[in-house]
Each structure stands twice: as structure tokens, then as C-alpha cells.
Image (spheres, rainbow, N blue to C red):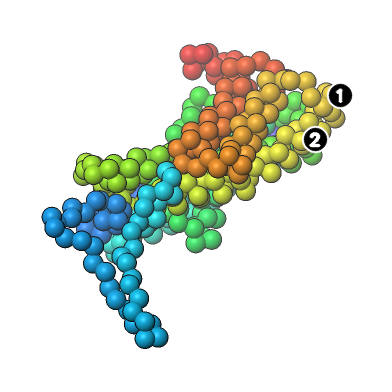
Amino acid sequence: MTLAAATNENLAEISNVLIYSAMAVYTLAFFAYIAEWLLGSRSKVARTAAALTPKKATAGTAPAVTVKQGGGTAVLERPKVTVRAASGSRDVPDGPGAHGGDEKGDLYGRIAISLTVLAFVLAFGGVLTRALSVERAPWGNMYEFNITFSTTAVGVYLLLLALKKNVRWLGLFLTTSVLLDLGLAVTVLYTASDQLVPALHSYWLYIHVSTAILCGAVFYVGAFTTVMYLFKDSYENKLAGGGKPGSFATSFLERLPAAASLDKFAYRVNAAVFPLWTFTIIAGAIWAGDAWGRYWGWDPKETWSFITWVAYAGYLHARATAGWKGRKAAYLALLAFGCWLFNYYGVNIFVNGKHSYADVGLGVLQAAGF
């Protein structure tokens, strides 16, 4: 065994330790986020209910009309009436956040964010040392793609926080999914650090796959925001219709941004990253021309990348031209993200094609029961 090989094995082992350490810290962050939700005030989260719950008028009374004097002329000022518009466009206030506007809850939230930053640094170190162990990009197989994707998703979340975006509520759900993703990576998808097949020895590996990972991370944020929008919109509809949601739904959903805010944010992040996804597909076609002598061959990965592009293009087009907003657009956005997920997991694991080098290996699949 050469000294270089031993050093590479040492770096690969350090990478594994860092990934497991990141999982441990993410677990602590998960509990801190739970504490933020549970210990935050429940007495300051009735803004949506106050705005949408119908008020019963007293029999024989009429809306008050105030009189203003303007230049010697009496001006009647009728009370402002909020009329429900299309789904997702009601003018209701955003919730106070997971902490419920409470100092104690806010403290646990800040602790959770600090732990998330620490876990992100550890995971990034794990990805970096994995790359250094074989002196290549750290996304040559499904294990590496998973740890890089989850790290990028957390990085997108932290960047949005740094930009003062109202996404702190996403922390609990993000850490939960990241822990599941990393758990899948270190068990079912784990692959020992090794060199790549010849087709992957290209600078396009850095360009094409890195942009695909970044797009997936942003699509993930948009998809989860869309799911929360559907819950919040149903909650607002029930309140506006005179219904009374359960105490758990009220305590949880009242803290989220308004349905209109969630809908708008999901649309903006999907629209912002869509051009990069277009570039990702074009870059992949150019790389395929270099590696296989053809730019497009309807390989399963190519096909599902294009299907994903069409789904997101349809979503953006429907919103921009047909005026689709609210639930119809949300369902289309989730369908598009489902295509991306199948392209991410299903094609790589269950479908044979020229991208089979991204597979996790027959032995691992048999051990997993596939």
C-alpha cells in the first residue's frame, strides 16, 4: 500500500466521521426546533383567526358610518370591508413564527439555528474531505450525491435566513428530512470512496452535477413551502367559512406565514431557479456529446430531466399566462417536484441506462431488499 493510498483512506474515514458528527448535531438542532415550537407562546398566534372568523352582526344594527369634514363638505367614510379573493390571495397577516412571538421560544429557535450552522459546517467538511480523498468532485455515486444535496439544501436555508427571508419556520422540517436523507445515505446508499468510470472524467462533472444539486435544493424548499401553503390555505378557508379548526391546527398553522405569502414565496423560488435547471439540461447534453458522441439519446435520466423541465415550465406558464394561483398551481408544482424526486432516486436506483454509474451497487441493492 502506498503512502498516497493510505492518506486517501484516512481522508475518507475522516469524511465518514464528519458526516456522522453532522447527523448528531442535526439531531440536537431537531430537538431545539421542537422546543421552539412547543415552548413558544400560544397566546399570540390568533392573527389569522381574528382576520377571517366571521363576526355575527347584532339584529337591527347597521355598519357604522363616520363623517369627515373636507373643505367645508361632509364626506361619508364607509367602513372597509375585506372581501375574499381567489384562493391564496386573501389579505391576512403572517403568523409570528415558530416561537410564537415569545422570548423563550425565540431563544430555543436561535439555539436551533446555531446548531444547524454547526451541523452544516461539519457536513460540508465531510463532503470536502470525501472529495479530497480521491481528488475529484464529491458526487460520483448516490451516496456522495445525497450528502452533497442535503448539505446544499441546508445551505440554501441558511442563505435565505441571512437575507432576512421569513423561512425560520422551515428549520424543523428541514432538519427532519436531512436526517432521513443522511440516514439513507450512510446505510442503504453508502459506497466506499473510489475513482470514477472514464466517462465521468470531465470538467462537466463539476458544472452539470453541481447545478443539478443546487436546483434540487431550491426545488425542495419550494416544494415544502407549497405543502405548507396547502395546509394553511385549508385552515384559512375553514375559518372564513365559519368553521372551527382543532387546537393543534390552530397552534401550529397560526404561526406560519399567511397562505398568500407562502404561495408567493414558493412561486418566486421555483421561478428563480428554473433558468438554472434549463442550463443543467443543456450542460448535460453537451457533456453527453463529448462522452458518448451524441447530445441526446432519450436515456432514462435525460428523459426524466426533460419531463421535470416540462412540468416546471407548465407550472410557471400557467401562473404567468392563465392566471393560475393557489391550489391548482400548487398541485402542479408538487407534480413537478415529484418528477424531480423520481429522477433523483427512481431513475438512478431502479432504471438501467447510461447513467447506471450513479447506481449504488448490486450488493447494496440486494441488502436493501430490491
Q: Which mark is residue 33?
A: none
Q: Residues within 10 Å of mark 2 (few under 14, many from 20)?
A: few
Q: Which mark's residue is nearer the viewer, 2 or 1?
A: 1
- Residue drawn at 48 percent across, 29 percent down: 184
Q: Which mark is residue 202?
A: 2
- Location of residue 103 (image quadrant): bottom left
Give me the C-alpha separation between circle 2 and circle 1. 14 Å
Circle 1: residue type = Gly
Position of 128 with respect to 162 (left or right) is right
Q: Is residue 56 above or below residue 178?
A: below
Q: Position of residue 353 (x, y in %)?
A: 70, 17
Q: 277 and 143: which one is in front?
A: 277
> How many numbered marks, from 0 up?
2
Circle 2: residue type = Ser
Residue 315 visible, this orientation: yes
Q: Which residue does the numbered mark 1 point to in the structure image?
A: 293
Residue 148 visible, this orientation: no
Position of 307 with respect to 59 (left or right) is right
